[in-house]
């Protein structure tokens, strides 16, 4: 029997279960716990966390709300976004999570629910996304593909939720910053993988009457370009422009290996 790793149907539709909308419910205590816990998770599993292009975020128009949008290929993406938001952007994450009723504690970290089985409940989540951007302590992060896709899936295609939120945000706040974010996981010279993150160029949306399909297409291209640029960095081993959020010390056997490589052995003479 073949194993199906990915589905084109969102999990709430597969489960066919009614779930009420649940907003985020954060507090200083729970955010501190989540920040330590999620950072420790990454440090235990990955050798390093590298990121580039953060100036695109820091140089944005900070008087207006910002949306970061990224691809979604595995379970770690949400943990990575949490650490990006809290440790690089210095904001509280607000992240739309499907089937949040199965993981209610994530609400304490800034997650809120979306149920794609119910159009009414899904619309409630979209409207909530727009409202929460009024508080600049929040940073809205979205996986606009709507479902988990395989790594490096092409073409990158979005559902219309991101464009809807962006348009409504412009109507309410006058402008919104949209920043594509590439996330990848790869092995370099260590026996553990590394997290690679790249911030793309900021897109400033000021016209709420922009055609939604056209806007969706432009955002798809922006994210795919950012992901392709990052893939080029990885394939060439080009990490010189990447900053380091954390990097582990080499294990004892890797230190021995490095030491042996540094020893100048005498040349072997011909017999």
Image (tube, rainbow, N blue to C red):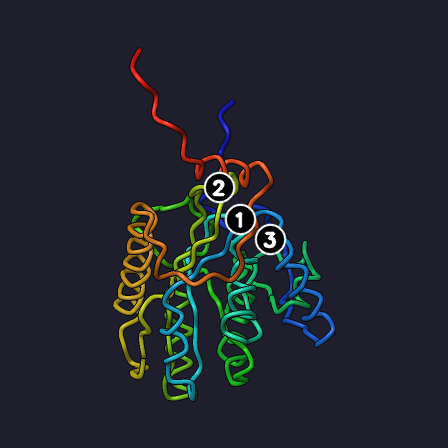
Mark 2 Cα shell of 10 Å, populated few (<14), some (14-19), many (≥20): few
Q: In the displayed structure, would residue 62 be above or below residue 79?
A: below
Q: Name the residue beneath numbered marker 1.
A: 47
The quadrant in which the C terminus is found is top left
Mark 3 Cα shell of 10 Å, populated few (<14), some (14-19), many (≥20): some
Q: Position of residue 8 (x, y in %)?
A: 44, 45
Q: Position of residue 260 (x, y in %)?
A: 48, 35
Q: Name the residue beneath numbered marker 3.
A: 43
Q: CA distance from mark 3 to mark 2?
A: 14 Å
Q: In the displayed structure, would residue 41 be above or below residue 7?
A: below
Looking at the image, do the residues carrying marks 3 and 2 touch, with CB atoms under 8 Å apart?
no
- Label 1 sits on a secondary structure element that is loop
Identified at 42% across, 65% down, the residue is 69
Disc with the residue nearer the chain's start (3 vs 2): 3
Q: CA distance from mark 1 to mark 2?
A: 7 Å
Q: In the displayed structure, would residue 270 be above or below residue 168?
A: above
Left or right: residue 182 versus residue 25 is left
Left or right: residue 111 versus residue 240 is right
Q: Name the residue beneath numbered marker 2.
A: 190
- Label 3 sits on a secondary structure element that is helix
Q: Position of residue 191 (x, y in %)?
A: 51, 38
Identified at 68% across, 73% down, the residue is 25
Q: CA distance from mark 3 to mark 1?
A: 7 Å
Q: How many marks?
A: 3
Identified at 34% across, 21% down, the residue is 268
Looking at the image, do the residues carrying marks 1 and 2 touch, with CB atoms under 8 Å apart?
yes
Identified at 33% across, 55% down, the residue is 230
Quarter of image, res 173: bottom left
- Label 2 sits on a secondary structure element that is loop
């Amino acid at each position: 029997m073949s194993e199906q790793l990915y589905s084109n149907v969102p999990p709430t539709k597969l489960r066919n279960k009614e779930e009420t909308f649940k907003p985020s419910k954060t507090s200083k205590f729970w955010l501190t716990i989540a920040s330590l816990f999620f950072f420790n998770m990454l440090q235990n599993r990955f050798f390093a966390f590298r990121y580039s292009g953060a100036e695109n975020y820091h140089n944005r128009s900070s008087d207006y709300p910002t949306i970061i949008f990224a691809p979604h290929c595995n379970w770690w993406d949400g943990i990575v976004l949490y650490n990006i938001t809290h440790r690089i952007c210095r904001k509280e994450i607000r992240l739309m999570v499907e089937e949040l009723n199965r993981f209610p504690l994530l609400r304490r970290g800034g997650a809120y629910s979306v149920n794609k089985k119910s159009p009414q409940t899904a619309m409630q989540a979209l409207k909530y996304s727009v409202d929460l951007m009024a508080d600049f302590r929040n940073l809205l992060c979205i996986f606009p593909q709507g479902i988990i896709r395989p790594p490096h899936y092409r073409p990158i295609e979005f559902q219309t939720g991101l464009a809807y939120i962006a348009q409504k945000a412009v109507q309410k706040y006058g402008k919104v910053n949209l920043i594509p974010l590439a996330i990848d996981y790869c092995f370099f010279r260590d026996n553990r993988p590394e997290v690679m993150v790249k911030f793309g160029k900021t897109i400033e949306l000021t016209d709420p009457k922009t055609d939604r399909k056209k806007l969706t297409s432009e955002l798809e291209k922006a994210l795919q370009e950012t992901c392709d640029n990052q893939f080029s960095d990885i394939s060439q081993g080009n990490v010189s422009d990447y900053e380091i959020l954390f990097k582990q010390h080499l294990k004892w056997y890797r230190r021995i290996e490095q030491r042996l490589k540094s020893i100048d052995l005498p040349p072997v003479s011909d017999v």
